[in-house]
Structure formats: structure tokens, C-alpha cells
Image: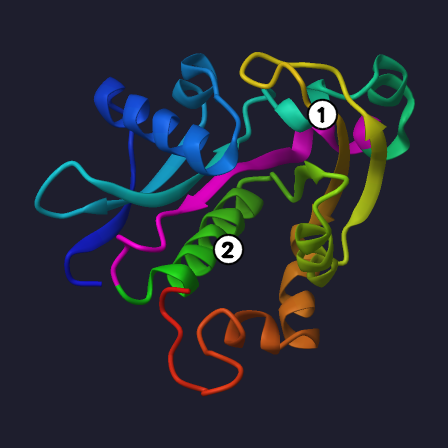
Amino acid sequence: METAHFTSIQTEKDLSLFKHLAGHYVGVDLPMSYLEDALVIALKDKFDDRLYGGFVMSYNGNIRCLEQLPETIQKHHDLIRKNRDHCFEINGLWLDKKAAPQGSRLQLYLECMKQSIRLGLKGKHKYVYAYSSDNHKLRQFYKNFNSWKIYEGPVRPLPGCENPGSEVVEMGCMKRLPLTVLRNPNFLVDRAFNRTSRKLKWIS
């Protein structure tokens, strides 16, 4: 990817653009205050201000997928009580598949893994994420991670997501991530190659 690179973005201009594009592709209008307090990684053009994709990792206690849970779950679920201070959240992952350079899809996942490992080394050894209960494609995708299900059901509205419906919230462990990849070698291969032609499937 000679024309673009992954970088941490922090300026109001870049974060505003990321907010707009993530809202378009993910369907959630992430608040600026949330983005300003998080690690926002974007696939950015080297020659202008275009963004082709990215993701958010929130690790300073502002974890939206836990905040949306019923209060009884937040207060009494063993995994949350024991690990909340050691958690980070993966959120707002998106990619403009039509505009992004070749190789972006695979490298987006690799960059997400790299940043997760960095946070794990800093003591954030648990990660959490959420997805819609009726999104069967994501349900199958996240089976690769061997995570623990914390909750499935109606969640509370949050700023930028006023009508969330029913969600699945899961927690994974960084120590198990390498084993997960080893047990599922096709996890990354399938994101780089087309299953029928076996040609490089950089953008699909």
C-alpha cells in the first residue's frame, strides 16, 4: 500500500471525517468526546486527507458496549466486575472497499491485531465488542475468537445510537488470541484470498 498508511489520528479535522465515515459504514454516530479520548487508527492517504478505513480502541474506561448493558448486568456479572479495569473496546471498524488500496482488507485486520497486542502489553489483556443479535454474518465471524458471551438481549440507548435494539456483547482474552489464530489458520487466509480462484482478494 504505497499510497496510504495506518496512523493514529488526533486532529479535530481528521476525527470529524472519521466520525462521518464510520457513521456511514457502521451505522453509529460515535461522539467526538468518545473519539478524542480513544485510540483512533485510520488508513489515511499519504498525499491528501482521504481516509479509507480504520477502527477505534477505547481503553480509558469509556467502554460503550458495556455502558449500554442493563445496570444489573454491569454491576453483578463476574467477568465485568473482575476485568473492567483491564478491558479495551474495539469499535467503529470500517473499510471503503471500493476506494481503498490493494491489500487493505487483510492489513486492516493485521493492524487491529497489532494495536490489540500493544494494549495487552500495557495491562489491557481483555477486549470487548458488541454486534446486533440479528447479524448472523458477524455472529459466525466472531466465533473465530472463542470469546465469552456476556449478554444478549435489549440494550440501553447511548449518544449516537438511540435505537440499538438487541445486541450481543462478548469478551475475549489477549492470551488466547495467538492460539485462536493457530487453531483457525484460514481466518486470515480467507481475508486475503478468493476461495474459488485462490487469487489475492485484496478488496472484495
Q: Which residue is mark 1?
A: 66
Residue 52: where, in percent of width, then height?
29, 46
- Magenta-tinted stretch: 80-101
Name the side, left or right, on which 23 lies relative to 128: left
Query: Label 2's element?
Result: helix
- Residue at 15 percent across and 57 percent down: it is 3
- Residue at 59 percent across and 19 percent down: it is 161
Q: Residue furthest left?
A: 47
Query: Label 1's element?
Result: helix
Name the side, left or right, on which 61 lies relative to 48: right
Q: Is residue 97 magenta?
A: yes
Q: Which residue is mark 2?
A: 113
User: Measured along the vertical axis of the image, is residue 157 above or below residue 107?
Assistant: above
Q: Is residue 204 magenta?
A: no
Amino acid bearing label 2: Met
- Residue at 67 percent across and 18 percent down: it is 163
Residue 74: where, in percent of width, then height?
82, 20
- Residue 46 or residue 203, whichever sits in front: 203
Name the side, left or right, on which 19 lies relative to 181: left
Q: Residues within 10 Å of mark 1 (few under 14, many from 20)?
A: many
